[in-house]
Amino acid sequence: MRFGSLRVPVGRRDAPGRVLASPWWRAAVAVAAGALPALAFPAPSLWWFAYVALVPWMLLIRTAPTGGRAALDGWLGGLGFMVAVHHWLMPSLHVFIVVLAGLLGLLWAPWGWLVRLLLARTPTRGRAAAALAVVPSGWLMVELVRSWEGLGGPWGLLGASQWQVDAALRMASLGGVWLVSLLVVAVNTAVTVLVAVPSVRTVAVAGVTVCAVAMGSAWLWVRSPQPTGEVRVAVVQPGVINGVGGAERRVQRGEELTRALAGRDVDLVVWGESSVGADLAARPDLARRLAALSREVGAEVLVNVDARRSDRPGIYKSSVLIGPQGPTGDRYDKMRLVPFGEYIPFRSALGWATSVGKAAAEDRRRGERPVVMAVGDEGLRLGPLVCFESAFPDMSRRLTRDGAQLLVAQSATSTFQDSWAPGQHASLAALRAAETGRPMVHATLTGVSAVYGPDGDRIGSPLGTERSASAVYTIPLTDATTAYARLGDWPVYAALAVLAGLCAAEAAGSFRRRPGRGSPVPPARTARASAGRPGR
């Protein structure tokens, strides 16, 4: 093929097209493109990449020949994303993770269809502008549905990749992680239009500008909560202790590290999830040991008991506050359990999962309500969460509205010690702190343990996965209330309104295009009435 004096080899020019024309190659590209956003999360933590990570996936979808193929590209990309973000679960779930990712990936099928609807071929300026609102809204609906505990919870929300960006944390204080996700996907949509549709680049530039102005305005004008006091909290991280007698040796190591805190003027000591492996009512000797430890340090100790209870049937994971006289009576039983890790959904049908991985042999029991605990003579009000409950924005918001001044997440990720999981989990506390305006302590058995202030900024140095140590943090307290704590998930409702508007507009357009509606159809010309051949 010749353009002027330039000869372009047709075969080379069409090579990408031929690859995408193959359904198998196209499927592989979709899976790979969907996996790219995982690089924005810890451990790679390429937060800036989140703003363009969806572009290859969206460029692929918009070239789909049919809406069905676009939905398939969306599903396959969703599968790739779920495997990439949860790949550290493979040692526990093995091949079952692919099955789960395939099921959850179906949530992205409607999103793929939506991307093609608005961005296929050469969209008008109006349609491109609509895409900047509709495509992010569709993505947010996917995040909302998969945030249900039974589907694995809100792990890997795109907005959570921005946990270390000050401007994004200010946005989170306005509309939670949902608002940050909307903004990130809006930028991806604008970049996709900028790359693929030259005729409407002004719309894309305007979209990027609006997102930048919104983020900059939040960074400049949303004030960090002003401190009204402070509290000194110690985090005790015993490290990896396995084997015979591991539960008792873990308690002993926790006692050693806590005893070393005596004289350091701490107000609260926090141990990680499953730090105590016996019910304290059934082990009064252990309860007395922990009470003596509290007296020695001069602070109450928040432990986490993972054991079969003596006062009711079943195994519970419970945050228990220990004072100088023993358990204070303040106890929180974990409400949201990890699917397959702590219980098996529909065990009668899916119980076979225990034979192919490390799925729960026995379901843990659920707590009934959140609990705000009173700590010490100063009356510090503490809101405990256990493990992946720190991923749920509504739980920390509920504790804040119930009066918690400090949020604490007790966690254990020792099963995934050398993976991305510990860093990803610790980063969630930054979002929860920024959303609520309440400082948050993320205390683990084996790392990463970290503390964040009421604005989401990290306080002090984290305890990495290689550490067996304790650390003391001076944490500012505040009684300020963020917009998100007051108003809740308003970005979700805004996204629903946008999608409802799209449905109404498409329905109205379809109605107008129906024969017999709208403008009358001109009568067909007959041969006798033909203007071109009068007299016939």
Image (tube, grey):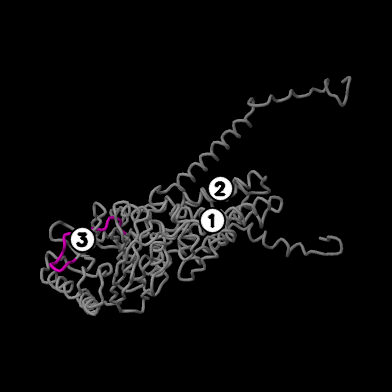
- In which quadrant will I find the C terminus? top right
Q: Residue at x 62, y 56 (%)?
A: 192
Q: Secondary structure at mark 1?
A: helix
Q: Nearer the viewer, mark 3 or mark 1?
A: 1
**88 and 485: which is toward the camera:** 485
Q: Identify the secondary structure beneath mark 2.
A: helix
Tag 1 residue: 217
Quadrant for the N terminus, please: bottom right
Label pair 1/2, CB-CB below 8 angstroms: no
- The image quarter containing residue 321 is bottom left
Please say whether residue 329 is one of the residues in the magenta stretch.
yes
**Please, is residue 404 above or below residue 92 in the view?**
above
Which label was assigned to residue 122? none
The answer to whether 2 appears left or right of 400 in the picture is: right
Relative vertical location of residue 442 with respect to residue 239 in this rendering, above or below: above
Q: Badge 2 local density, few (<14 within 10 Å), some, or many (20+)?
A: many
* Labels 3 & 1 near each other (Cβ < 8 A): no
**Which residue corresponds to the image point at 56% horizontal and 62% vertical from the top-left?**
53
Residue with the mark numbered 3: 315
In this view, the residue in front, 393 or 535, is 393
Residue 378 percent across, percent down from the top left: 23, 63
Q: Position of residue 485 (x, y in %)?
A: 38, 51
What whole-number distance in Å separates the C-alpha atoms at marks 3 and 2? 46 Å
* Part of the protein shown in magenta: 322-337
The answer to whether the residues at label 3 and label 2 have Cβ atoms under 8 Å apart is no
Question: Which dot, 1 or 2, sits closer to the camera?
Answer: 1
**Which of pointers 1 and 2 lies earlier in the amino acid sequence?**
2
Task: Classify residue 414 by image quadrant.
Answer: bottom left
- Residue tagged by mark 2? 133
Q: On the picture, is 304 further left or further right than 441? A: left
